[in-house]
Image (cartoon, rainbow, N blue to C red):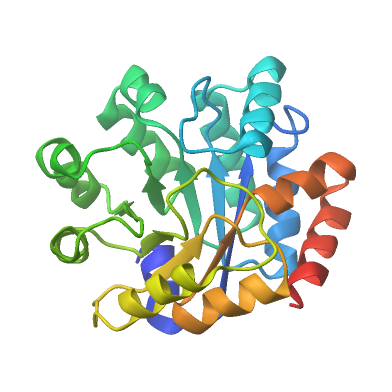
């Protein structure tokens, strides 16, 4: 069974998903970072595909992507590194997260096939329109058993959220605010109202909240209103200040009280 689906069937609260950009801070960091995140107890690991025009990302992740590309990271190399990491870490779900352009350049089916071979368990493509997913990617997702995880925001209509819940698998990625990624110290009252509203919809798939999770307060609030939290910018900051992955993972866990 798909490792991501299996995890979500067994555990539906306090999930921790950690994002990092492959190729940052060094080209050969990927395997070590994944291994230390697995040792630290991350439930899901999101491997970021660096891209030159990351429209949904804030300055921290943009910078990490620029460094990774300068280091020589490519999508094919990323998948080779993931395959190496999978051999050392057989159980933790890995999710590839990146923009549509690099996937299209590789050719979508070739990407899905290679991602499956490498040990990827799901895919997040922030700029993939839902209609394009339905017409061009849903069949690939089902054929290779790689859920395409869609994002929702406070502006996403209830009708669209229910369509995503009906036609996509894995989890629903709840963007905490209609803005780019980046760490925040707390959530605003409107954000909490949004969390409560989605929590009350009775959706069939679990939800994880991302964008702005940086400390125990935001992690706990995300877990209160969903199945867990996604952390990216905060972890990348820690990797930049201390490129030792074990130390960065320990610092992240300390920050969120886990």
Q: Nearest the camera: 195 or 2? A: 195
Q: Which quadrant would the C terminus be assigned to in this image? A: bottom right
Q: Position of residue 78 (x, y in %)?
A: 56, 31
User: Can residue 47 be seen here?
Assistant: yes
Q: Quadrant of residue 170?
A: bottom left
Q: Would you place residue 183 above or below residue 203 in this image?
A: above
Q: Nearest the camera: 41 or 199? A: 199
Residue drawn where x is 72% and y is 45% of the image = 236
Left or right, 23 with reference to 97: right
Q: Would you place residue 124 above or below residue 163 in this image?
A: above
Left or right, 103 with reference to 54: left
Residue drawn where x is 77% and y is 45% of the image = 237
Left or right, 70 with reference to 92: right
Residue drawn where x is 58% and y is 50% of the image = 86
Residue drawn where x is 13% and y is 44% of the image = 134
Left or right, 111 with reference to 245: left
Q: Would you place residue 193 above or below residue 166 in this image?
A: below
Q: Which quadrant would the N terminus be assigned to in this image? A: bottom left
Q: Quadrant of residue 214?
A: bottom right
Tell which residue pokes out farthest to the front in this image: 189
Q: Position of residue 29 (x, y in %)?
A: 75, 37
């Amino acid at each position: 069974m798909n490792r991501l689906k299996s995890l979500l069937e067994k555990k539906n609260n306090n999930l921790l998903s950690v994002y990092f950009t492959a190729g940052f801070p060094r080209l050969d960091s990927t395997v070590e970072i994944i291994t230390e995140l697995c040792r630290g107890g991350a439930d899901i690991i999101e491997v970021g595909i660096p891209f030159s025009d990351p429209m949904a990302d804030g300055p921290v992740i943009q910078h990490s992507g620029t460094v990774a590309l300068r280091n020589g990271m490519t999508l094919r190399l990323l998948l080779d590194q993931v395959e190496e990491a999978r051999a050392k870490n057989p159980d933790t779900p890995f999710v590839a997260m990146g923009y549509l352009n690099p996937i299209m350049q590789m050719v979508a089916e070739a990407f899905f096939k290679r991602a499956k071979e490498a040990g990827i368990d799901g895919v997040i493509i922030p700029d993939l329109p839902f209609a394009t997913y339905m017409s061009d990617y849903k069949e690939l997702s089902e054929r290779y058993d790689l859920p395409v995880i869609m994002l929702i925001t406070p502006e996403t209509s209830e009708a669209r959220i229910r369509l995503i819940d009906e036609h996509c698998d894995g989890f629903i990625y709840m963007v905490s605010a209609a803005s780019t990624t980046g760490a925040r110290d707390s959530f605003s009252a409107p954000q909490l109202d949004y969390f409560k509203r989605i929590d009350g919809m009775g959706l069939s798939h679990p939800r994880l909240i991302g964008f702005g999770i940086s400390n125990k307060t935001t992690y706990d609030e995300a877990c209160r209103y969903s199945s867990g939290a996604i952390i990216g910018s905060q972890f990348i900051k820690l990797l930049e200040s201390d490129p030792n992955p074990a130390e960065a993972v320990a610092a992240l866990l300390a920050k969120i009280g886990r």
